[in-house]
Structure formats: structure tokens, C-alpha cells
């Protein structure tokens, strides 16, 4: 496969995953605002930081308001991580690799782009947000469903899958990190109803609210939630699950191409760390430090995959 085709597949699915993740973050921010008494526009600071666009927002807006934050995250094309920008970029990459995709996958991608481009063409009213967030999640889910239901499990599938899970791991780790250092106003709030609402919003933002309840009978405990989103390999948005998939896809590529690259060693080392640790050790070491280290290594893996498979040639 040409490096450019692999690059297009990898980034197509990173952008699609990112679009859904941003929509879920906005949904979590709205839930906090609706359920928390005394909510202010500053509550959106954590959402912007979790999305990794706080400084970019500050360059565009002098003051932080909920309306501007939502607009920046959903439809501002000056923000390369906005939903509209991501869907546009994902569709452009899909068009570039059109011959590598099944008809079902291409049509789902193109229809998603048409629908969301129209829906996000004008500023949204507050009452319209739940409907548009649902549409974003539904459209991106249809793309994934068409892809998984119609594609051969060959190198095309594996590059796309690696893009999905690399992006998903980055998102989950950033959400957890922001929860500990931004969303919680003070140590005195730990264990209060405010803390519980925020944890619930985090679980909902990664589609883990109900599944968490199936695994843990008790309430929202920081250690249990961190364990669920970092180490529980059965949870499809956990770091461990993402790396189980990434390692598996890279091993398939190694078999297809008859060679192992530096990225294989990096992915396996990250996965081995996730499988060998327990949550108490991670918290004792420092959750923030652990997540920072994970994000750095996850980014490094992306670079190594790009270089190893010559994405730009």
C-alpha cells in the first residue's frame, strides 16, 4: 500500500473519532451546567482544556462564555479540532482514499459531511444542542458501523483501526487528567454531590456511565473510575482496550509486510505497562504524572507509525 493511502485511512478515522469525542465533551459540559447550581461560564474552561484548545480559544475570544465555547467546539472552522473541521478533514481524507473504501463506508462518510455541514452552517440556539449532539454521535457511529460491517480485515482495515484507537486513547487520557486538575474546584469538594455530578459527566462523555454501574455496584469513587477508564480492558474506551487493539492491528501489519518496526516495540511497551499496573500504584505514583507520560508516549507512537510506514511518500 502507498504511504499516502495509509496516511489517508489513518487520519480519516482519527478525525471521525475526534469529531465524536468533541461532541461528547460538549454534552458533558452541558450536563454539568444543567445539574450544577451556581454554574458559570468558567465551567467551560475545563471542557476547552480537555479538548486541548484552551489557548486557541483565548486567541479568538477575549472572554470565556458558554455560547462562544460551544460555538468554538462545534462549528468554528478556525479551530482545527471543531466538529465541523474534523468532519471536513475526515471526508477529505476519505475522498483521497476513495478506492480503498467500500461503497457503504464512503456513502456514510459523505452523507455525514452533508448533514452536519448543513446543521452547523449557522450559530446554534441552546435548545438545538441536544439534537445536534445526537446527530453527530449518530453520523459518526454510522460511518464506523458501515466500515466494520463491510471492510475486509486487511491492511486497509488495520491502518483505519489504529487511527481510531490512537485518537480514542488520547481523548480518554486527557478527560481523566482534566478532571483531576481543572474540573474539581477544591479538595473540599471531593466526595460531595458536586464531585459526583462531575464524575458522572466524565463517564457519560466516554459512553461509560451505564457500563460503570454494571462493573461497580457502589457510587462514584475516583479510584474505581480511574481503574475503569485506564486498566479495564473490557471497557471499549479504556486505555488498556485501545492498546490491545493497536497492538493487535500492528501485529497484523507486521505479518502482512514481513517486518517489525520501532512502533511495534513502543505500542507493546505501553500495553505491557497498562496490563502490569494496578490503579493504587498509579494513584500513589501520581495520576497526573502517569497520564502526562501516557499522552507523550501515545503521541510518540503516532509519529513512529507515520515514519515507519512512510505516510508522506
Image: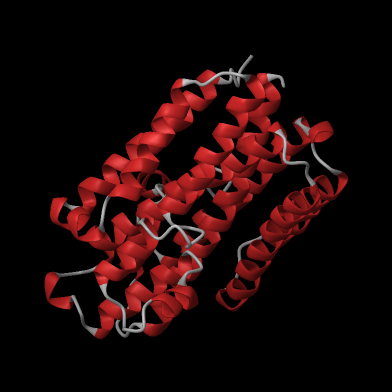
Q: Is residue 226 left or right of residue 1?
A: left
Q: Residue at x 58, y 21 (%)?
A: 309
| Residue 204: image location, x then y, percent | 46, 71
Residue 104 at least partly seen: yes
| Residue 86: image location, x then y, percent | 61, 46
Q: Is residue 236 left or right of residue 183?
A: right
Q: Is residue 22 left or right of residue 132?
A: left
Does residue 32 lie above or below 140 as drawn?
below
Q: Quadrant of residue 12?
A: top right
Q: How many marks?
A: 0
Coloured how?
A: secondary structure
Q: Residue at x 84, y 50 (%)?
A: 104
Residue that protrudes farthest toward the top in the picture: 313
Of residue 41 and residue 282, the one placed in the foreground of this image is 282
Q: Residue at x 79, y 33 (%)?
A: 100
| Residue 233: image location, x then y, percent | 44, 57
Q: Residue at x 68, y 60 (%)?
A: 141
Query: Which quadrant: the N terminus?
Result: top right
Of residue 194 and residue 10, the one placed in the foreground of this image is 10
| Residue 312: image location, x then y, percent | 61, 18
Of residue 302 and residue 235, the one placed in the foreground of this image is 235
Residue that protrudes farthest toward the right in the picture: 103
Query: Which quadrant: the C terminus?
Result: top right
Does residue 236 lie above or below 35 as drawn?
above
Residue 120 at least partly seen: no
Amino acid at each position: 500500500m502507498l504511504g499516502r493511502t495509509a496516511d489517508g485511512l489513518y487520519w480519516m478515522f482519527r478525525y471521525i473519532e475526534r469529531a465524536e469525542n468533541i461532541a461528547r465533551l460538549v454534552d458533558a459540559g452541558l450536563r454539568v451546567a444543567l445539574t450544577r447550581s451556581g454554574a458559570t461560564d468558567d465551567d467551560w474552561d475545563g471542557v476547552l482544556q480537555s479538548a486541548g484548545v484552551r489557548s486557541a480559544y483565548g486567541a479568538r475570544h477575549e472572554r470565556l462564555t458558554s455560547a462562544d465555547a460551544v460555538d468554538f467546539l462545534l462549528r468554528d472552522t478556525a479551530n482545527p479540532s471543531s466538529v465541523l473541521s474534523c468532519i471536513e478533514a475526515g471526508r477529505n481524507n476519505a475522498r483521497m482514499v476513495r478506492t480503498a473504501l467500500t461503497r457503504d463506508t464512503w456513502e456514510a462518510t459523505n452523507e455525514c459531511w452533508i448533514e452536519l455541514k448543513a446543521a452547523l452552517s449557522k450559530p446554534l440556539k441552546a435548545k438545538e444542542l441536544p439534537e445536534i449532539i445526537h446527530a453527530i454521535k449518530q453520523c459518526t457511529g454510522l460511518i464506523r458501523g458501515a466500515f466494520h460491517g463491510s471492510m475486509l480485515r486487511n491492511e486497509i482495515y488495520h491502518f483505519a483501526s489504529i487511527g481510531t484507537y490512537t485518537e480514542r486513547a488520547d481523548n480518554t487520557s486527557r478527560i481523566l487528567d482534566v478532571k483531576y486538575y481543572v474540573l474539581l474546584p477544591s479538595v473540599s469538594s471531593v466526595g460531595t454531590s458536586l464531585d459526583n455530578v462531575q464524575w458522572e459527566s466524565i463517564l457519560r462523555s466516554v459512553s461509560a456511565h451505564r457500563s460503570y454501574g454494571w462493573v461497580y455496584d457502589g457510587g462514584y469513587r475516583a479510584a474505581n473510575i480511574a481503574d475503569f477508564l485506564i486498566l479495564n480492558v473490557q471497557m471499549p474506551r479504556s486505555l488498556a482496550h485501545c492498546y490491545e487493539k493497536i497492538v493487535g492491528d500492528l501485529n497484523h501489519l507486521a505479518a502482512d509486510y514481513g517486518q517489525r518496526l520501532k512502533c511495534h516495540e513502543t505500542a507493546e511497551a505501553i500495553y505491557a505497562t497498562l496490563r502490569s499496573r494496578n490503579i493504587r500504584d498509579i494513584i500513589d505514583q501520581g495520576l497526573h504524572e502517569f497520564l502526562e507520560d501516557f499522552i507523550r508516549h501515545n503521541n510518540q507512537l503516532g509519529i513512529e507509525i507515520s515514519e515507519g510506514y512512510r505516510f508522506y511518500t
